[in-house]
Image: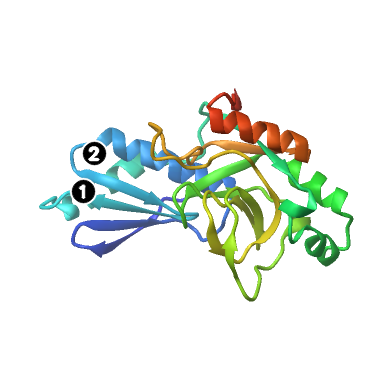
Amino acid sequence: MKTPIIFRLSPNTILLQWEPVISEEVARTIQYTERLLKKHFPSVIIEMTPAYTELAVHFKKNTDVSAFEEKLKGIFQKDIPTLRETSVKNITIPVCYETEFASDLAAVAKYHNISEKQLITLHTQPVYHVAFIGFLPGFPYLTGLSDTLHTPRKRTPETSIAKGSVGIGGNQTGVYPSNSPGGWNIIGRTPLNFFSVEKKQPSLLKAGDTVQFEFISKTEFELISLEVSSGRYQLKTQSL
């Protein structure tokens, strides 16, 4: 993995940019870089904003950013951020793919000339990697969607997509954490809450986690919804 190119975005912000290829390796490299910078520069960094192939680093006022850039280059020479073996949390996300929750399932299946059952199987098989959280608070951008399911976004976005809707947009899949306009193709819905300001970690997922979707029936959807509402639902997780 090559070291990133460094750009100055503002007097107090730099951008680290890797090769423009969306992949698990690049995502892991960015996540490792975040940990590296938090370790070496905890007193001058306000926050970091990751994307698929970039990482913005925001500094406190009066930080000598030029000096930081030189130190950073030295660190990259000694410890090139790359894919590392780390403990990863895998989260199972229950999804109901029945028609009332999946307004575009039939259209996506037709687009790929496969059955709806095949589409669901292809969507639930992979282990997806959370590259970053964006667009809406708690919205996970996931890598790992089967090439067979890559589907163009809608030409005209919907004015309202229901909370928990699972969609496909291009080569990505993700979950809408709240009611929102959107242009992704909706193929199912999860009863889980993906964002809550009342929790210590507001976002259900974070960059570096992995996700696997699990098919559930409408009855199971309703039961899990009740458990989530009452605080009794136990999230299925395991360490990889």
- Secondary structure, mark 1, is helix
Mark 1 touching mark 2, by CB under 8 A? yes
Amino acid type at circle 1 is Phe
Residue 107 x %, y %? 80, 65
In-image side of 32 versus 169 (left or right): left
- Secondary structure, mark 2, is loop
Q: Quadrant of residue 210?
A: top right
Q: CA distance from mark 1 to mark 2?
A: 9 Å
Identify the mark nearer the N-term, 1 or 2.
Answer: 2
Q: Nearer the viewer, residue 188 or 146?
A: 188
Q: Residue at x 62, y 38 (%)?
A: 211
Q: Residue at x 55, y 43 (%)?
A: 130
In the displayed structure, 188 sits above or below 240; it is below
Structural crowding at the residue carrying mark 2, measured as other residues with C-alpha within 10 Å and reported as few (<14), some (14–19) or many (≥20):
few
Instruction: Judge whether residue 129 can be spotted in this image.
Output: yes
Question: Which is in the foreground here, disc 1 or disc 2?
Answer: 2
Q: Residue at x 61, y 28 (%)?
A: 227
Q: Nearer the viewer, residue 20 or 183?
A: 183
Q: Nearer the viewer, residue 155 or 145?
A: 155
The residue beneath circle 2 is 41
The residue beneath circle 1 is 68
Residue 77 x %, y %? 35, 43
